[in-house]
Amino acid sequence: MRLPKDLIPELERRYSRYWWKDDEELNYNEVVADPFKNLIFTILSQNTSSNNTRRAYISLKKNYKIDPHVLSLADPKELSQVIRPGGLQNVKARRIIEVSRLIVENYGGDLERLLNLPKEKVREELKKLKGVGDKTADVLMSSIFGQREYFVVDTHMMRIAKRLGLVDEGASYEEIQRSLKEFLPLDVGGDRLAGLFWLMAKYTCDSKKPRCPECLLNDLCKYAKGRGIKRGYDL
């Protein structure tokens, strides 16, 4: 099963209004351009909303220079209070300090040294950093190499892949990642399509109240068919 290419314009029409908006206070473009800042931002995003991540990162930015040398020496209690808006602040503070310390010890505080390794090795080394799992590593990898090579799978992507019937309930991260890369025509839509699909997963394929009747994919979806949902939209 593969997403029909003629649905891409409709995905754009419906979900582009939710696209991430940058602002001077956050400066997300700066975050993406700096591998270490992107890594810290992604750690802050774990198990919380986009808005809470933004608030936590802005607070961190106001109180610390986002640099591995600085954050490796941060006081855990003080740091946890600074990033409190993101939730799980004690866990995330420890992760940020530990990751920063390892980058200082192993790469002289320069994450670019790691990223200059062969890309297969980069992901392997990233996952050795405490608090960096598959998703966090792939966020950083995809910002460099694109979603076609390193497709990011979070809870929204896991949910929609299982509901569509692309994978079984017990599928691994790698199985879900592979199935979504095969389902989405990324050679046509690229990273933009991956983002629009994620927005559909978040805003339409809701975890508790999925809006199946208006979903573009309900005629393809195993979950919707199981609920007796028929196509309720016009293209």
Image: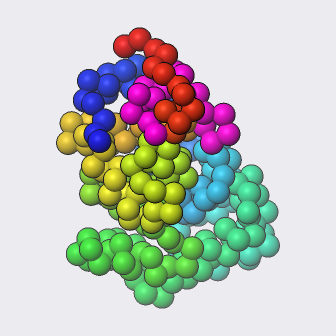
33 to 13, vertically: above or below:
below
Spot occupied by residue 54 in the image (x, y as percentages of width and height): 62, 46
**Residue that appears at 55% across and 52% down:** 155
Spot occupied by residue 10 in the image (x, y as percentages of width and height): 37, 21
**Residue that appears at 62% across and 74% down:** 95
Viewer-nearest residue: 165 or 62? 165
Magenta stretch: dominant SS? loop
Specify the quadrant that holds the C terminus: top left
Location of residue 208 (image quadrant): top right
Per the image, is 210 magenta?
A: yes
Viewer-nearest residue: 152 or 163? 163
Q: Point out the residue furthest to the left here.
A: 187
56 to 205, vertically: above or below:
below
Spot occupied by residue 192 in the image (x, y as percentages of width and height): 34, 37
Can see residue 108?
no
Specify the quadrant that holds the N terminus: top left
Give the magenta part as a residue range.
206-222
Indicate how the structure is coloured in the image: rainbow
Spot occupied by residue 143 in the image (x, y as percentages of width and height): 36, 54
